[in-house]
Amino acid sequence: MKLTKKQLTTANKGKLATHAKQLKFLSDNLSRKGINIESIIKTIQKYEVAIPSWALGAGGTRFGRFGFGGEPSNLHEKLEDIGVIHALTRSAGAVSLHIPWDIPENPAETKKFAKSLGIKFDAMNSNTFQDQPNQKYSYKYGSLCDRDAKVRNQAIMHNKAVIDYGVALGSKSLTVWLADGANFPGQNNFRESLNNTLNSLKKIYAHLPKGWKMFIEYKPYEPNFYSMVIQDWGTSFLLASQLGPKAFTLVDLGHHLPNTNIEQIVATLMSQGKLGGFHFNDSKYGDDDLTVGAIKPYQLFLIFNELVFGMQNNKPKNPIPAWMIDASHNVKDPLEDLLQSIHAIETAYAKALIIDQKKLSLAQKNNDVSLGQEILQDAYQTDVRPILAEARKRAGGVLQPLDTYRAMNIREQLIHDRGANTRATGL
Amino acid sequence: MKLTKKQLTTANKGKLATHAKQLKFLSDNLSRKGINIESIIKTIQKYEVAIPSWALGAGGTRFGRFGFGGEPSNLHEKLEDIGVIHALTRSAGAVSLHIPWDIPENPAETKKFAKSLGIKFDAMNSNTFQDQPNQKYSYKYGSLCDRDAKVRNQAIMHNKAVIDYGVALGSKSLTVWLADGANFPGQNNFRESLNNTLNSLKKIYAHLPKGWKMFIEYKPYEPNFYSMVIQDWGTSFLLASQLGPKAFTLVDLGHHLPNTNIEQIVATLMSQGKLGGFHFNDSKYGDDDLTVGAIKPYQLFLIFNELVFGMQNNKPKNPIPAWMIDASHNVKDPLEDLLQSIHAIETAYAKALIIDQKKLSLAQKNNDVSLGQEILQDAYQTDVRPILAEARKRAGGVLQPLDTYRAMNIREQLIHDRGANTRATGL
Amino acid sequence: MKLTKKQLTTANKGKLATHAKQLKFLSDNLSRKGINIESIIKTIQKYEVAIPSWALGAGGTRFGRFGFGGEPSNLHEKLEDIGVIHALTRSAGAVSLHIPWDIPENPAETKKFAKSLGIKFDAMNSNTFQDQPNQKYSYKYGSLCDRDAKVRNQAIMHNKAVIDYGVALGSKSLTVWLADGANFPGQNNFRESLNNTLNSLKKIYAHLPKGWKMFIEYKPYEPNFYSMVIQDWGTSFLLASQLGPKAFTLVDLGHHLPNTNIEQIVATLMSQGKLGGFHFNDSKYGDDDLTVGAIKPYQLFLIFNELVFGMQNNKPKNPIPAWMIDASHNVKDPLEDLLQSIHAIETAYAKALIIDQKKLSLAQKNNDVSLGQEILQDAYQTDVRPILAEARKRAGGVLQPLDTYRAMNIREQLIHDRGANTRATGL
Amino acid sequence: MKLTKKQLTTANKGKLATHAKQLKFLSDNLSRKGINIESIIKTIQKYEVAIPSWALGAGGTRFGRFGFGGEPSNLHEKLEDIGVIHALTRSAGAVSLHIPWDIPENPAETKKFAKSLGIKFDAMNSNTFQDQPNQKYSYKYGSLCDRDAKVRNQAIMHNKAVIDYGVALGSKSLTVWLADGANFPGQNNFRESLNNTLNSLKKIYAHLPKGWKMFIEYKPYEPNFYSMVIQDWGTSFLLASQLGPKAFTLVDLGHHLPNTNIEQIVATLMSQGKLGGFHFNDSKYGDDDLTVGAIKPYQLFLIFNELVFGMQNNKPKNPIPAWMIDASHNVKDPLEDLLQSIHAIETAYAKALIIDQKKLSLAQKNNDVSLGQEILQDAYQTDVRPILAEARKRAGGVLQPLDTYRAMNIREQLIHDRGANTRATGL
């Protein structure tokens, strides 16, 4: 299904007057503080976050999975779903594919279809944490870190193949997330595992085409519960530094130990020019993969504060990170989940943009801790939703994506078209 | 120092027009959703939170303490400071005293002076975690839990004395926080410690005058680092249940293990009619005692959501909890810290009050998880600051307490009056 | 497959002389401290821990599952596997069944077969966290807590049916673990969920035959990642207290927030006569389900210290807890995993039994913290493996179960008999 | 006070026969496994760990401090106390001084006195986390990271002075632990703080004499509760790498977020040749500073496993880390606390030394996870106390230091000599 311009325009009708009033009020408030709302609207308007192909179906836990009707059963349908989100928000014009879950049978056609929906191909994701049918060697005890060169080579070849698929689709980056690690003390030798991983990554790195980047994720635990080879940003940074200028660290918000100060990690990585990508989600306990902003919206705001500062003071040059949502749960309609996530990300971004960085810097200079907090809180307490709505409107989207999604009965139609029991590839 | 009505009125001048405009805008927005702003303003206007007498000086850590000039050096000055906060906010009309840090030499006079500032005496706090000069038995190894009946009796007598001071001042409740516990496995017998604590509390309970309540705090660690006798709400609840109807559990936000769902504890305790008190602060790691709302404002909002629901659906009857701020740090002016904390508490409260509980209940009934989240987020994203300002204005306070506090140069005056090196009693 | 007495006797040959020497050495060391090794050997000899039927196949994670050859594909084969473990250790003479994974088609026959292996039926486990094919109502949003009475009734009926299966098999208890909870703020009303759960449990409780017990598990998170209805021991205890004398709390070692002092919870529950059962496993991060003793063996020892003390000072009367191993991972042969777990449990138990409780009590009385620690450490540092070996030998098992298991090529034979790709029911 | 050779020899009398028997038993057991006990005894005999000068008095918490009688009140007495520990254990022949708590008035004399006790001067510790009387600029808002160059310079000069004291005493290294950080979002700019810290460290680094090393500690929180400039090993490693070959990371066991896999950090740092030092203690919650081995002895063993492996496979060359105990609490006699810590460290070390590394490596090669665990557990379950006793005996110490310490009534004598109310400098 594809939403027409007319449908979208119609959806905004009846809401425009109120929106205009609210925008005006916010604009006045901000200009009283010397902030120009226009530049913020433009920044938000340009912002895009990639949708991972596996987030369009219900995610499960090890205890079970409850499906949601109308799930896409192939790549084409997945792109269609992203097309819907993008049409409503104008902020989801990219997809992040996962191989082998989404192998494009005809890349040129897939690319063409995606283009018709305004969708580009962002970072490619490899998978060496599961065994595929007919796979020669098992990843049961590791992949890029494995003691057996044959296992490592298979995993390296897979990553190279993923790059090749990416080239065919126009992607420019590879994300490597490794489940490699150990469940028990004594299972692995830490140094050997790290060393094997570095050497494997070097071979994949050598296969990167010009202009490509490699993003290295880190995670403290799960699915291994004693140790993970790349347990933290320090290890990822170590690897990325030794690999070279195309290698970067990727931060997934859910991949941290309890209480970690993530915004500081973001600042540190940017200060070294090594923050490559971002996976958005939210969590209370571990890698919970909840809707962005559902649990700790203030932390998200503080992270965006660092990103905004880092991009405005970009020395050494850090690339614009590859943004991706990595959240999905089985108690919500996956498309609604994504709409809420996009909204939360842009909310945090817009609030960070209205922080008065000059005043903040001055407060810091004066050791005025109360004032520093006030400045952040003043931006955070501001209701920036009119900025988001205006940005979407200007870009051709709708003022209130979730409302419109519901009013259009999109899920009902998907169930009608695809059936109630389809199951998307993914976890 | 005491602020005059004229000073306060003057402070609002020049800000009234903008405030009125913002209040009108918010009022319109809310009434479009069927919410009457008036009742919310009134609820906030009536809300009061107690200030602990030890929060008026700088708090330290075990690594050191950096003082703040103009700290109050006696109870009279402490009351003066609370008077300033109360004059500005009209929300701090209560003090929570700590014995022996704040023994009133002449209770009647102290009471009279407090009354002149509009300040009542909320829960009294005993201290059996430190040894006082000339104290007969040491609390080094415990107080109410101690193996030695002489130590326990001394601690019991102290608590009774605290109650007596409270009676003289017009207080109606006693808060018992116990540092009792162990630093090492083998140090204590858990069952003996718990049993001794229960029996000691029974004796204190027996001394409670009619109409009094006893609040029992819990804490998982610090200052003991292996175990605390009352390690969690379950243990506090167990004790309170066995003590009787005057005994309640007190929740201090900083007294939980990482990732605890505190709002659920609040709901559970209210469902049993046993939530007696609340100590507000914020934290990222442990009992960090940071300004309320400085780290996890959304969690605070979710807690207030439970409190609002619990007070609106009060069956079995749970008393209105005793509210107190328990935060203080040495990098901020303590009075500014308290003003920010009050603001954060009332912000969370006001946002919780505009949650559409009926719509929420309906969404829950329909298993509409996305909508449930939307309803909470819609309230949370609303900028409720005009409600707070209006409530303060109506009550005789100022629109913007922190700004006014600074504009009036209050800290400078306190330093001038009291000196730069005074030190308030406390940690 | 079934091990013969002869096989077992043969396995010990060649090891007996060394064993005797080591036992003698330990016996001398202990008697020098006034400890009689005989009574400890007897206690260990009598000890039995139940094996859950789902631990005989490889456990997976949400990211995938790697099978282990020769997994049992039905209840009969599961019992056979437990029979092997029991024959080797003489400590695994009980099985804990999970319904519907292990519905006995012919209970009488199943019971008879189990008896032939020396296996009893311990606590029955119900499952309302997954939907079964052809199930009328889904547990997607809850089971015993659900807002919909029809869902609750279905879950209640299922639990009653599980009790009925248990009656037919000779079990005497029901373990209720609920995945019920919420992934997002706003999804559920805490009080309604708790209240519904209590009322549902009451109906199940009413169905308990004479002499039966109900064990209520708690867990802070997973598979729900915002809240779990029974999040901690306090909530379980609350429910158990309100249900009546047949209801108890069950402690699963992996179901706690980071840094929880579990041994204190054990002591507290026993002091109230409400510790009903125990699920053993180990973990570093969350509910990792690792082999018992693989990560925190000292914590396990401290827990057994409380259990030993509690059973020796059993006032109020706490029943002997129902012991069960709840661990399984896919990088180890499941039977080896269980053999290691049994060994770790009995090691901790034996070490706890040689703690000099009188000396410990005296050290505590004298506030001699260093000595209290020394007493625990002295017991812990003692190599008690000869006690375990002797207990097994006397009971008809083998001195070194894991070695014997390997020497007998049992896994190879299971793969030969059952195939390399069978898959046991379970997670 | 100083223990004489005769006293020590006498102390062992009556214990020698039992010790010899136990050593023989262990030696036989080990040699059956192909392990030569002699080389392990020698390794333990050579092992020494530094005692920090602040661990000889009772440590306190922010809630209070309970003294222990007979605390040393000057550097001379502190050295005497270490002399006692060293005489008993022959493993504490080094002191780690803290400036300004232990400024030597006459370094040559201090050095001479220390030498007479067999004590060397290990790493020097600077202190920029507290303000000293008459200090020109305050460290309230930071030291090496401070925005104000004057504050930074003062802190740099202090560190240089500490190096100079160290030169006079024969020390060869400087440990920098920074409390720098922020209590609130908005207080600091992360990048500026990190950059200032790097530049300050560069100036200190430039002052390091030939042959000196600089150790950089990290810590996630406390005394700052929002962020610490050097929050984790990654940040410390980043700084050490940019400073040069004399700079290393120092691992303090208590300075990690919950559940951190510390042994993996150790392995990673050694693999980069950057593990410079180690601060031993134990903890359950945070930086609890409990006696080593009191809470997580198995974790300590796993860490030593990495250290042993790293030193045996030292490529790239990592220096032997500077070992120090950093633990002290106020419920134990500080000297007993240290004796227990030394014992726990050497126990873990000896157990790690009897791990069969070849067998372990082979098990890993075969993905034999159960066996890998068995090998570690076999070493861990072995009672190695006879090795420690023998190593001490050979070196001139006593078989059972804590027993001897008590039998000699050393604390009573210290109280008699120094008084019951002395207070050592420190926290």
Image (cartoon, coloured by chain):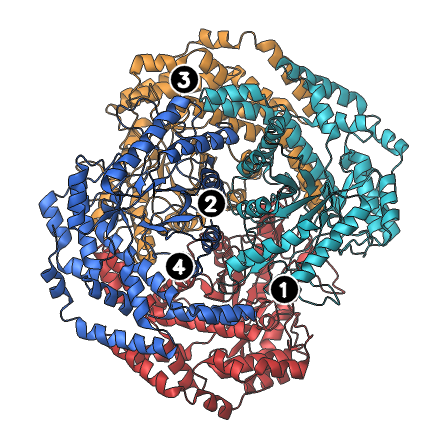
Chain colours: A orange, B cyan, C blue, D red
* Residue A320 position in % (x across, y down): 48, 35
> Relative to residue A359, is residue D114 drawn left or right?
left
Q: Secondary structure at mark 4?
A: helix
Q: Secondary structure at mark 3?
A: helix
Q: Nearer the viewer, mark 2 or mark 3?
A: 2
The numbered disc on residue B149 is 1
Determine the chain carrying the residue at label 1: B
Q: Residues within 10 Å of mark 2 (few under 14, many from 20)?
A: many
- Tag 3: amino acid: Val
Residue occupied by mark 4: C304
Does D31 appear above or below B203? below
Answer whether residue D426 is visible to the viewer in this image: yes
Q: Are marks 4 and 2 in contact (CB under 8 Å)?
A: no
Q: Nearer the viewer, mark 1 or mark 4?
A: 1
Residue occupied by mark 2: C233
Does C138 appear above or below B139? above
Q: Quadrant of residue C105?
A: top left
Q: Nearer the viewer, mark 4 or mark 3?
A: 4
* Residue A148 position in % (x across, y down): 22, 52
Distance from Cα at disc 3 to Cα at disc 1: 73 Å
Nearest the viewer among B45 and A84 is B45
The numbered disc on residue B420 is none
Residue occupied by mark 3: A84
